[in-house]
Image (tube, rainbow, N blue to C red):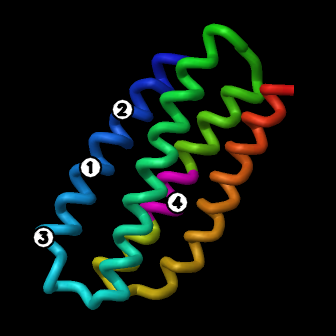
Amino acid sequence: MDRTFLLAGAVAGLLGVAFGAFGAHGLRGRLTPDMLAVFETGVRYQMYHALALLLTAAMLPRMPGKALVAAGWFFVGGIVLFSGSLYLLAVTGVTVLGAITPIGGVAFLAGWLSLIVAAL
C-alpha cells in the first residue's frame, strides 16, 4: 500500500505543477480573476495533499495500520472531489459543481483525522 500512496502522491504532485502552470499561463485572460482564484485554490490544496500522500506512504512501513491506509484513501478522494470540482467549476462555470467541493473538504479532514488516530 505504501507504493500505491507514493505513486498517488507523485502523480498528484506532477499534475498539480502542470495544472498550476496551465492556470498561470493558459487560463490567465480567459477566466475572470475570481474563477482563476478558484482554480488556484484547487491547485494549492492538491499540492498540500500530494505531500500528505507522500508522508502517508513514508509512514506505512513504520506504522502499518488501517488508520494510515484510510488517511491515504481520504487524501486521494479529497484531491479528486475537492480540487477536481474546483477545476471543473473554474473552467466550465457550472456552479452546481461547487456542491461537490465540500465533500472533498470533508475527505481531507477525515484524512488528517485518520493521521491523528494513527499517531495515537
Asked if residue 63 lies left or right of residue 27, the reply is: right
Q: Badge 3 local density, few (<14 within 10 Å), some, or many (20+)?
A: few
Report helix, strand or loop for mark 3: helix
Which residue was labeled with disc 4? 81
Which residue was labeled with disc 3? 26
Mark 3 to mark 1 CA distance (whole Å)? 13 Å
In the image as oriented, which residue stretches furthest toward the top?
62
Mark 2 to mark 4 CA distance (whole Å)? 18 Å
Which numbered disc, 1 or 4, marks the residue that appears first in the sequence? 1
Residue in view at x 23 percent, y 85 percent? 31
Which residue was labeled with disc 2? 10
Q: Which residues are magenta?
A: 78-84
Would you say residue 82 sits in the magenta stretch? yes
Q: Are marks 2 and 4 in contact (CB under 8 Å)?
A: no
As drawn, 40 above or below 63: below
Which residue was labeled with disc 1? 17
Going by the numbered disc 3, the residue's amino acid type is: Gly
In the image as oriented, which residue stretches furthest toward the right?
120
Q: Quadrant of the C terminus?
A: top right
Residue in view at x 26 percent, y 59 percent? 20
Asked if residue 76 lies left or right of residue 33, the reply is: right
Q: Position of residue 11 (x, y in %)?
A: 34, 37
Going by the numbered disc 4, the residue's amino acid type is: Leu
Residue in view at x 42 percent, y 58 percent? 44
Secondary structure, magenta segment, majority class: helix
Q: Position of residue 87 (x, y in %)?
A: 36, 69
Mark 1 to mark 4 CA distance (whole Å)? 18 Å
Q: Position of residue 76 (x, y in %)?
A: 53, 43
Mark 4 to mark 3 CA distance (whole Å)? 23 Å
Going by the numbered disc 1, the residue's amino acid type is: Val
